[in-house]
Amino acid sequence: MQNSPQDFRRKILGRKGEDLACKYLKKHGYKILKRNYKTPFGEADIVAYDGEYYCFVEVKARESDAFGLPAEAVDEAKRRRYRQIAGYFCYRNREELPCRFDVASVYEGEIEYFENAYV
C-alpha cells in the first residue's frame, strides 16, 4: 500500500525537525552519536553525548497546535520505550552509562529543548 501525501508531509516535517534538533545540539556542544537508532524496542530519534550524559532525544515537530504542543505528545508509552532503548544501548556498549531523556519540541520552525524531560 502506498503512503498517502499526508504521510509524506509528516516524514518531511519529522526529518526537518530532527535536522533542526541536531543543529541545536551541535551548537550547544553535544556530539551526535546516532540518528534514528533502531532497536528491538523501537527507534530513538537522536542519541547524543553532552560530555556527561548519553542523551536520548525524542523530536516532536508540528505545524499546528490544534492537537497540543509537540512536547505534549510524548506519552507514557513513548517514555517507557525510550527507557528500554537506553537500556539496550547500554547493554550493546557493555558499560553502565549515565543516561538522560530529552525532548526537542519543534513548532513553526522554532525549537524548544527540554533537558531531563522525564525519568
Image: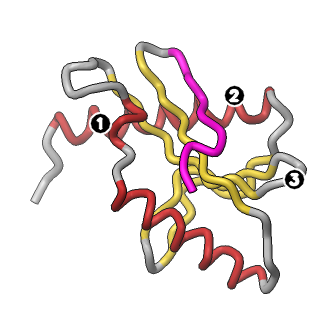
Identify the residue position indicated by label 3 in the image: 52
Q: Earlier in the sequence, mark 3 or mark 1?
A: 1
Q: Main secondary structure of the magenta part?
A: strand
Say what secondary structure mark 1 lies in.
helix
Marks 3 & 1, CB-CB < 8 Å contact: no
Q: CA distance from mark 1 to mark 2?
A: 21 Å
Mark 3 surroundings within 10 Å by alpha-carbon count, few (fewer than 14), some (14 through 19), many (20 or more) = few
The residue labelled by disc 1 is: 10
Relative to 40, residue 100 above or below:
above
Among the 4 quarters of the image, the one containing residue 95? bottom right
Compare marks 1 and 2 and give the one earlier in the sequence. Answer: 1
Q: Quadrant of the N terminus?
A: bottom left
Crowding near pointer 1: few (<14 within 10 Å), some, many (20+)?
A: some
**What is the residue that sits farthest to the front in this orientation?**
119
The spot of residue 117 in percent (x, y) is: 56, 43
Please rate how many residues cluster around mark 2, counting C-alpha atoms within 10 Å: few if below 14, some from 14 to 19, many from 20: some
Stretch of the chain drawn in magenta:
110-119
Q: Which mark is residue 24?
A: 2
